């Protein structure tokens, strides 16, 4: 099996393939979270644990490594609980009712798209233009629908931004499972929206908001990096 520096394709466990960028994201999130906790006068162990697991999830996701689903499952359970306590109900439902079962589905799909039977790395690919149009339209329809439901039937604190975030997240998770590179552009959009959500929540005094904002910023950094890593995987492995 070919080995590509920084992509994780030559590593069976993924742990031995950590790069300087991976360590930067892990240490950056840890140190920044601690600093924010000191400044704001409070530390949330639950929020930090959920963030740490999610950071590992997106790092392995950027490598195209199947371990991302293991950490994604654990992180989704914790973050879903945090979202519910913060009154961000659509995202809470996304994590618990959608993202958790999708980790099992994603694991099964990626096993079929591995580079080799003994590999833990997926073969990546680009969407066709009709698929991209369908992706964008799906996001738009979901945003409209969720915004209507949240605004009319719940006391959601941020219905439009919550609807936008959960809609993009639903579509993105589906795109990720089928190993399309376009997922990273959607993650970037979602990270920006959620960053705004947590800034508003932070100003409103919502628990966990500060660390969640820090988490979104490191998600954003990793998503930009993920574009280049998955493009490299697609190019070097001659995917369909």
Image (tube, rainbow, N blue to C red):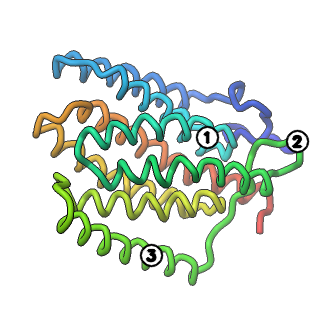
Q: Considering depth in this image, is 203 or 162 the residue closer to the camera?
A: 162
Q: Residue 85's x, y, as percent?
A: 27, 38
Q: Residue at x 63, y 58 (%)?
A: 177
- Which residue is the extreme one toward the front? 153
Of the 4 image quadrants, the one containing the C terminus is bottom right
The CA span between labels 3 and 2 is 35 Å
The CA span between labels 3 and 1 is 25 Å
Query: Which secondary structure lies at badge 3?
Result: helix
* Disc nearer the start of the sequence (2/1): 1
Q: Residue 4's x, y, as percent?
A: 75, 42
Q: Residue at x 59, y 57 (%)?
A: 176
Q: Residue 43's x, y, as percent?
A: 27, 18
* Disc nearer the start of the sequence (3/1): 1
Residue 240 lies, with reference to residue 106, above or below; the image says below
Of the 4 image quadrants, the one containing the N terminus is top right
Q: Residue at x 31, y 42 (%)?
A: 83
| Count of numbered badges drawn on the protein | 3
Pointer 2 local density, CA inside 10 Å: few below 14, some 14–19, many at least 20: few
Q: Considering depth in this image, is 8 or 56 the residue closer to the camera?
A: 56
Are the residues at dot 3 and dot 1 in contact (C-beta closer than 8 Å)?
Answer: no
Which residue is label 2 attached to? 118
Residue 64 lies, with reference to residue 77, above or below; the image says below
Using the image, tell me which numbered label, if any, was put on residue 28. none
Residue 195 lies, with reference to residue 13, above or below; the image says below
Which residue is label 1 attached to? 68
Q: Residue 64's x, y, as percent?
A: 67, 47
Using the image, tell me which numbered label, if any, was put on residue 138. 3
The CA span between labels 2 and 1 is 17 Å
- Which residue is the extreme one toward the left? 204
Residue 109 shown left or right of residue 190 in the figure: right
């Amino acid at each position: 099996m070919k080995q590509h520096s920084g992509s994780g394709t030559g590593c069976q466990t993924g742990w031995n393939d950590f790069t300087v960028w991976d360590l930067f994201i892990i240490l950056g999130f840890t140190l920044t979270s601690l600093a924010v906790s000191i400044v704001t006068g409070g530390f949330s162990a639950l929020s930090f644990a959920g963030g740490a697991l999610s950071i590992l999830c997106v790092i392995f996701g950027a490598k195209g490594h199947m371990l991302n689903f293991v950490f994604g499952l654990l992180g989704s359970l914790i973050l879903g609980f945090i979202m519910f306590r913060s009154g961000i109900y659509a995202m809470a439902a996304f994590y618990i009712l959608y993202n958790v079962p999708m980790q099992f589905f994603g694991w099964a799909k990626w096993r079929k798209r591995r580079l080799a039977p003994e590999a833990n790395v997926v073969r990546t690919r680009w969407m066709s233009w009709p698929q991209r149009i369908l992706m964008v339209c799906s996001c738009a329809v979901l945003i409209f629908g969720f915004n209507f439901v949240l605004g009319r039937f719940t006391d959601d604190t941020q219905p439009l931004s919550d609807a936008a975030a959960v809609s993009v997240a639903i579509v993105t998770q589906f795109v990720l499972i089928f190993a399309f590179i376009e997922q990273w552009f959607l993650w970037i959009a979602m990270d920006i929206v959620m960053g705004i959500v947590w800034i508003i929540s932070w100003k409103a005094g919502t628990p966990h908001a500060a660390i969640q904002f820090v988490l979104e910023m490191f998600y954003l950094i990793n998503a930009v990096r993920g574009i280049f890593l998955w493009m490299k995987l697609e190019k070097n492995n001659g995917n369909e």
